Image (tube, grey):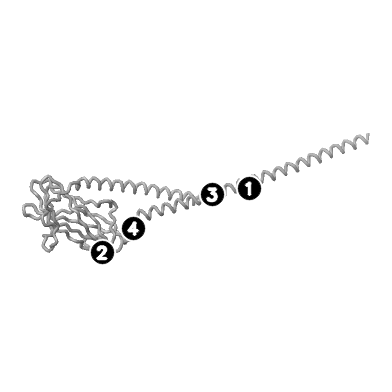
Amino acid sequence: MTTIRAFFIFALLLLSSSFFLQVARSQSDSDSEADAELVAQTVEEGSDVGDDIQDIGVGNYNPAPGVETVAVFPKNFAKMVVAGQETELLVGMKNEGEHSIKVIAVHASVHLPFDHRMLVQNLSTLAFNNASVPASVQATFPYIFAVSKFLQPGTFDLVGTIVYEIDQLPYQNVFYNGTIEVTEAGGLVSVETVFLVSLGLALLVLLGLWVRTQLQFLSKKTKKITKVEVGTRTVDASMDEWLQGTAYTQSQSNKMKKKK
């Protein structure tokens, strides 16, 4: 019985954890949808992608005031990245300043989650020949990258930066600085999948223990019914004794009559 209670408590903990996981995931989806509103409008005119990325002015610059950036993984809220395959990322830029922005390039890198100084991989750099974002306008720039196919599956940090100019002065914004889940090609097994499988196995074990308990209870009940039948036989024996006693009383009564 103690084992059943332990499994029952374990199942409740798994169910509660699953609930909080779904709430956290819904919150993440809501945040992603809110960010998607910022990248809803795309400025396509004059945003040619350049092939020459030798001189793009990538460096350590400060962000310009009034410029906001966000990133959205379209149809990929879990931020799953398959090693060796291309992943699309939308970079949203909102210009709330007074001057037009000239977008220079977008680039990103992969780092270890516990120490950003440990660089894992520099990703491709996307340069623009003539991309601009006028004042009070928001724009979207697609960025496609691929991590190395030899990268081990696991959690890594992705740092994405967009470089731009305002009045010929360079600036940059970090549009994404968060975790991604790298998986092998054909092996999209996430932590959530493992969790749900573990929950299903725990529930199956709990169900099996419950069925076993019910069978044991029915078996004991059947034994009790058999004992009642034996008790009936005991009553029959007592009735025999009662009959024997009655016969004995009659014989004693006959002896008394003969003496008289």
Label placed on residue 213 = 3
Residue that sits furthest to the bottom in the current view: 150
Label placed on residue 169 = none
Give the distance between the C-alpha atoms of the residues marked 2 and 3, in whole angstroms. Answer: 53 Å
147 shown above or below 4:
below
Report the residue marked by disc 1.
223
Q: Quadrant of residue 51?
A: bottom left
Please state which amino acid type lies under the numbered disc 1.
Answer: Lys
Please state which amino acid type lies under the numbered disc 2.
Answer: Ser
Q: Which of the two marks, 1 or 4, is nearer to us in this view?
A: 4
Q: Residue 203 in the image: state x and y as whole percent.
A: 45, 50
From the viewer's side, name the closer residue of 197 and 231: 197
* Mark 2 or mark 3, earlier in chain: 2
Q: Which class describes the residues within 10 Å of circle 3: few (<14), some (14-19), or many (20+)?
A: some
Q: Which class describes the residues within 10 Å of circle 1: few (<14), some (14-19), or many (20+)?
A: few
Q: Secondary structure at mark 4?
A: loop
Q: Residue 242 in the image: state x and y as whole percent.
A: 78, 39
From the viewer's side, name the closer residue of 147 and 47: 47
* Mark 1 or mark 4, earlier in chain: 4
Q: Which of the two marks, 2 or 3, is nearer to us in this view?
A: 2
Q: Secondary structure at mark 3?
A: helix
Give the distance between the C-alpha atoms of the residues marked 3 and 4, in whole angstroms. Answer: 39 Å
Give the distance between the C-alpha atoms of the residues marked 1 and 3, in whole angstroms. Answer: 16 Å
Q: Quadrant of residue 257?
A: top right
Q: Which class describes the residues within 10 Å of circle 2: few (<14), some (14-19), or many (20+)?
A: some
Report the residue marked by disc 4.
188
Q: Residue 207 in the image: state x and y as whole percent.
A: 48, 50
Give the distance between the C-alpha atoms of the residues marked 4 and 2, in whole angstroms. Answer: 16 Å
Report the residue marked by disc 2.
148
- Name the quadrant of the C terminus: top right
Q: Quadrant of residue 187?
A: bottom left
Q: Residue at x 41, y 54 (%)?
A: 198
